[in-house]
């Protein structure tokens, strides 16, 4: 087992502040490699410093009263009606929240609070972890932490326990009642309750309302700081659950019984409870349900079950499907005789396990497979070109050349077909995968970009790209797709000096003057007048962009090698 990752509670307050004020923590979702918010966050941090929030706000104007305070990006999850909101938080409000959490006195209070949440037999694996300096793929350290602490630990516990109860919370972040921050900081309804109101809790609520247009329910998604403050509530629920289980153990004692051993692992809103006594396990599950109800949470009944097959149920179902098909997906290649069959398989599996890690893995696999095929094709073509360049086209060869023999052979065009069908057809399958799996859309678009780049026919390139654009962008809430399509078409857009993308982030890439990304009418004007919008697009990285999409982590990791 690999070494466990350090979480941010091991940091001091200054280090925690530095952690949250990095671009990669500011947005937890993937963006094209040329986007960076480091300079914007640095400007805000230096401009505001320790100035109180009240001195930064315009009189009689509150961010709670304004729209577009954040840059909202709605993701169309299934190509139909299901959407998922993510935000690029207003950097000033983001800073105020981070500063509130990370100032020296508050940070110590919060660390002490988490010590109280650290109870026997309940393990939280969801405190944000400190990433490695360079990661081979997006959130590699976080994913590895989940694998170690959730999947591997669950399999280990199968040696000790017979049953596992599995559940998660429906719409967890959207259901958080901000008042529960008061309860968490005062440790309400616990044996160690203080009853002392905390200004930290009040200020966290204030900034969350400001970030949500005054809504007094839920917390935003999309940044590490939101995950962390959400963990305050979920950590408090761990303490409540622990004390409720202690009370249940006393009831067992009064009945002359011993409460069976148990172990609970939680990753954010996902719970796994282990016990060898099924009746006791059901008791624990009902107690958990009551605790969650007190905090305005609901169990997801569709994902709730008791299993006596811990080893397999500890592993995500999409991963098991991938493992089950190792005769098809193996280190030496795949058994599909065409790329089209391979892509159709991915499409069908994605309908069973949408937006899953295995879909991303398989899209990465076929991308590498196509890349290797095209490289070998280029090498063969280069060899042919060299052979024909050496042919003596003297007088004796002229008749043959006139008949088109040599000219046809000397002018080699890459085929519009690769094993399994046309690039147009393969792009159609990839587009459907992207349409139905928005979280994996950029992986599918990377495959499309690689295939289209292999074409020599510019009209065919433009035609396919236009069709992909129409399919993905002529629907509501398609902004995330726009970001990645622009990554693919940027070099051509630059040549033609045109850009069809309406999202303001895309317009920044195109070099257009746009209205501010965030509505800061509530802020004293001198604070934001020099906000470095131009720095959001890294011009040096933009120069390296090719029609084939390259992910930020891939480039950084490769350049490190």
Image (spheres, rainbow, N blue to C red):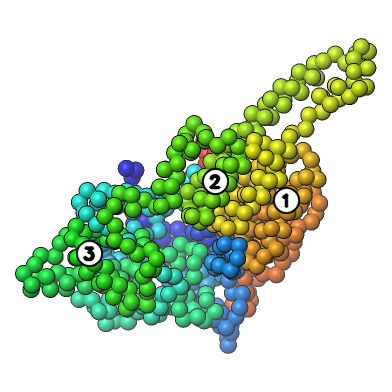
Q: Distance between the residues labelled 1 and 3?
A: 54 Å
- What residue is at 30 percent from the left and 72 percent from the top? 289
Q: Distance between the residues labelled 2 and 3?
A: 39 Å
Front-most of residues 395 and 326 = 326
Which label number is shown at residue 465?
A: 1
Q: Which residue corresponds to mark 3?
A: 281
| Sequence-wise first label, 1 or 3 | 3
Outermost residue on the left side: it is 256
Q: x and y percent of residue 57 in the render?
A: 56, 80
- At label 2, counting other C-alpha atoms closer than 10 Å, the crowd grade (few under 14, some 14-19, many 20 or more) is few
Front-most of residues 185 and 28 = 28
- What residue is at 21 percent from the left and 62 percent from the top? 278
Asked if residue 73 lies left or right of residue 202, the reply is right
| Residue 33 visible in the displayed image | no
Q: Which residue corresponds to mark 2?
A: 345
Asked if residue 106 lies left or right of residue 287, the reply is right
Residue 203 vertical placement versus 144 (above, below): below
- What residue is at 73 percent from the left and 34 percent from the top? 415
């Amino acid at each position: 087992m690999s070494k466990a990752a350090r979480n941010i509670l091991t940091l001091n307050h200054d280090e925690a502040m530095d952690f949250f004020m990095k671009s990669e923590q500011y947005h937890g979702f993937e963006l094209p490699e040329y986007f960076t918010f480091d300079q914007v966050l640095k400007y805000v941090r230096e401009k505001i410093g320790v100035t109180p929030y009240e001195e930064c706000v315009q009189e009689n104007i509150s961010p709670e009263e304004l729209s577009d305070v954040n840059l909202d990006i709605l993701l169309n999850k299934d190509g139909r009606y299901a959407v998922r909101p993510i935000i690029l938080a207003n950097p000033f409000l983001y800073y105020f929240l981070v500063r509130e959490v990370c100032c020296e006195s508050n940070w110590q209070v919060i660390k002490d609070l988490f010590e109280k949440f650290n109870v026997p037999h309940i393990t939280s694996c969801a405190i944000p972890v400190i990433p490695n300096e360079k990661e081979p793929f997006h959130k590699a350290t976080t994913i590895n932490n989940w694998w170690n602490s959730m999947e591997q630990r669950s399999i280990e516990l199968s040696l000790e326990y017979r049953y596992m109860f599995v559940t998660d919370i429906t719409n967890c972040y959207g259901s958080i009642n901000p008042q529960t921050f008061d309860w968490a900081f005062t440790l309400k309804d616990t044996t160690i309750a203080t009853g002392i109101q905390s200004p930290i809790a009040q200020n966290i609520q204030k900034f969350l309302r400001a970030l949500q247009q005054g809504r007094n329910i839920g917390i935003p998604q999309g940044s590490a700081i939101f995950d962390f403050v959400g963990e305050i509530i979920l950590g408090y629920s761990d303490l409540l659950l622990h004390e409720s289980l202690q009370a249940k153990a006393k009831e067992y004692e009064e009945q002359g019984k011993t409460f069976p051993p148990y172990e609970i692992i939680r990753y954010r809103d996902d719970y796994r409870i282990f016990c060898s006594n099924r009746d006791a396990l059901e008791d624990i599950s009902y107690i958990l349900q009551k605790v969650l109800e007190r905090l305005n949470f609901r169990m997801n009944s569709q994902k709730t079950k008791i299993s006596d097959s811990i080893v397999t149920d500890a592993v995500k179902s999409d991963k098991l499907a991938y493992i089950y098909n190792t005769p098809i997906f193996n280190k030496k290649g795949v058994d599909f005789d065409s790329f089209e069959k391979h892509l159709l398989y991915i499409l069908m599996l994605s309908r069973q396990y949408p937006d899953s890690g295995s879909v991303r893995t398989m899209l990465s696999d076929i991308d590498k497979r196509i890349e290797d095929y095209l490289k070998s094709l280029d090498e063969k073509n280069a060899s042919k070109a060299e052979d024909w360049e050496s042919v003596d086209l003297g007088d004796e060869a002229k008749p043959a050349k006139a008949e088109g023999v040599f000219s046809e052979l000397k002018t080699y065009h890459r085929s519009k077909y690769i094993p399994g069908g046309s690039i147009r057809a393969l792009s159609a399958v990839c587009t459907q995968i992207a349409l139905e799996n928005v979280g994996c859309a950029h992986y599918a678009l990377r495959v499309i970009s690689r295939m289209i780049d292999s074409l020599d026919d510019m009209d065919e390139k433009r035609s396919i790209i236009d069709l992909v654009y129409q399919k993905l962008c002529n629907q509501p809430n398609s902004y995330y797709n726009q970001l990645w399509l622009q990554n693919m078409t940027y070099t051509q857009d630059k040549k033609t000096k045109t850009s069809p993308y309406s999202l303001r982030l895309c317009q920044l890439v195109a070099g257009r003057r746009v209205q501010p990304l965030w509505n800061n009418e509530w802020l004293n004007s001198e604070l934001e007048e020099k906000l470095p919008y131009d720095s959001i697009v890294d011009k040096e990285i933009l120069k390296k962009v090719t029609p084939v999409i390259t992910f930020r982590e891939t480039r950084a990791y490769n350049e490190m090698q």
